[in-house]
Amino acid sequence: MALTTMLRRRLFSRAFSSHDGPSRWTTPGHQERPNGYLFNRTPPPPGQSRKWEDWELPCYVTSFLTIVILGVGLNAKPDLTIETWAHQKALEKLAAESSSSSSD
């Protein structure tokens, strides 16, 4: 119990800090006050649409094409699992046995 208390004090104390002042994890930030908008962007006036930035169209097109290519490519890949190979070999063996028994 004493060891746990000592470790907790060491972890949460400021004695091992290399500088004075607020921690980099607990600074209040750079913004004066929250304004309630996502990414600090004010919405456009009513009746106007937001203009796309230069990076948005290539990013959206590339993302869509990546999803399509991966979806088609991963669904069309050959089945190379050991279970499929063993199943095919078992079917071939059964077919060979049934043909040899029927020829007798």
Image (spheres, rainbow, N blue to C red):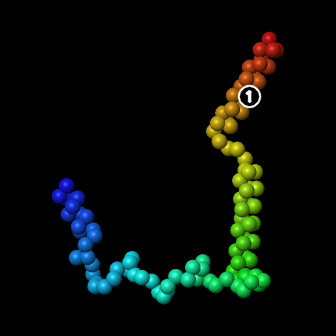
Q: Quadrant of residue 39?
A: bottom right
Find the residue positioned furthest to the left: 2
Indicate left or right for 24 with 100 as reference.
left
Indicate left or right for 5 with 56 as reference.
left
Q: Quadrant of residue 99?
A: top right
Identify whether 99 is placed above or below 3.
above
Indicate left or right for 84 with 4 as reference.
right
Question: In the rendering, at what x and y percent does residue 102 appear?
Answer: 81, 14
Give neighbour class at mark 1: few <14, some 14-19, many 20+ (Cα, 10 Å): few
Amino acid type, label 1: Glu
Report the residue at 74% width, 20% height from top.
Answer: 97
Q: Which residue is mark 1?
A: 92
Answer yes or no: is residue 54 visible: no
Q: Quadrant of the N terminus?
A: bottom left
Identify whether 16 is placed above or below 93.
below
User: Looking at the image, how many numbered discs can be counted on the residues?
Assistant: 1
Closer-to-camera residue (43/59): 43
Q: Quadrant of residue 63?
A: bottom right
Answer yes or no: is residue 33 visible: yes
Report the residue at 77% width, 19% height from top.
Answer: 98
Question: In the rendering, at what x and y percent does residue 21 appear?
Answer: 31, 85
Report the residue at 69% width, 32% height from top.
Answer: 87
Question: In the rendering, at what x and y percent does residue 37 appear?
Answer: 60, 80
